[in-house]
Amino acid sequence: MTNEIIGRDQGENADAPFEVVRVTRDNVKSLDSWPATGWTGTYNWLRTSRGSNAPVISTGDMVSLQIWDNSENSLLTGTTQKEVSINKVRVSPNGTIFVPYAGDILIRGMSPTSARRKIESALQPFIASAQVQLSYEPGQESSVDLVSGVAKPGTYPLPNRNSTILSAIAQGGGVSANLKNPLVRLMRGGKTYDIRADKLFSDASYNTVLRGGDKVVVQEDQRYFTAFGASGTENLIHFEQEKITALEAMSLIGGLDDTRANPKGVLVLREYSAKQVRTDGSGPSQRDVAFVFDVTSGEGLFAARKFQINPKDTVIVTESPVVSVRTVFGLLNTLLVTGNRL
């Protein structure tokens, strides 16, 4: 099968059940624009933005009030009592809390200081000298969930509107040490964003600000390609970085075996979906494509250096024709020695 692929000329693709593409420096750039397989082709992530350092009250938060009133005929306090406590009132789905005499007051989206002032103003017509102290406990919509991949998974409150994902991961005890090639996934509002942990940790612009209700999952990067043939290993090779070139893939699989490998026949097998097949030359003409590399020349090496491996690709290092000849001669020598002994 591999000899059939290597020996096939690109002009013979029309009647074949697969397409053969010989990768060169001239076509490697255009091949990079072909549809991605095995994943979206790049990780999608939110850049950082600055928020306020003040917390924001949200639906589901618990608000406690202490109201002081020094008037002699107070509507809230008794003759000897100067303050009254209203403990743990949950912010309703419409963003309000009920305050006696003032009614429902909208405080969602406000800082505790702004909410306190609004409640005082709402009480003024009924309790002219009222002073209010407000405290709150963040609810689910003011917290984030660290689901997995950290030392201490759980729900963590956001102290302010400027809390970042790195701060949350640090609160959770950091990324679990047993994870190889960790990937950070952020789930927000029905959308999912991914970034490799090493990239997140190395660039401050990726340290995005979290919102209440966000869910963070840290897990191993599941992308892999398969190594097969006359190389140093035959196995599933997981991506150790976001992108891997064909030349890097050859290094990851242990290189080409000097005694077995055919450096003119390094293959990358890839399967496209039916929707990704093209008839205008802007993509694969068949669902199954074999990319062929000749790494005996500078042309082939530079092409392999720029060609991107996709997840679920199969990298095959074919055996040199010399190996087959050696195998035949070895078998003949064994037969001759055995015959002489008989």
Image: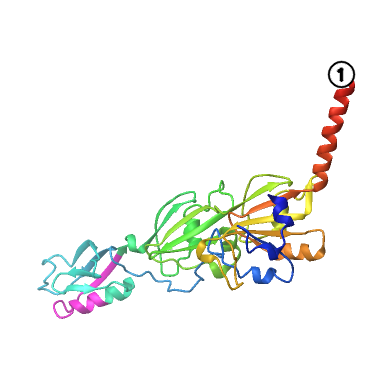
Q: Is residue 149 above or below residue 194?
A: above
The magenta stretch spans residue 49: no
In this view, the residue in front, 129 or 33, is 33
Position above or below: 195 against 96: above
Who is closer to the viewer here, 83 or 295? 295
Q: Residues within 10 Å of mark 1 (few under 14, many from 20)?
A: few
Q: Answer yes or no: is residue 237 visible.
A: yes
Q: Which residues fall within the magenta stretch?
A: 118-135
How far across and down, in percent of the image, does residue 131 sit?
23, 73
Kindly tell me whether residue 259 is visible in this rendering: no
* Residue depicted at x 69% and y 68%: 28
Disc 1 marks which residue? 342
- Disc 1 element: loop
Describe residue 9's horizontal placement relative to residue 44 as left or right: right
- Counting from the top left corner in percent of width and height, residue 280 is at 59, 73
Question: Which image quadrant: the C terminus?
Answer: top right
Task: Please provide percent x and percent y for residue 167.
Answer: 49, 61
Tell whether position 124 is magenta: yes
**The quarter of the displayed image where residue 8 is located:** bottom right
- Residue at position x 74%, y 56% in the image: 7
Q: How is the image coloured?
A: rainbow
| Type of the residue with mark 1 | Leu
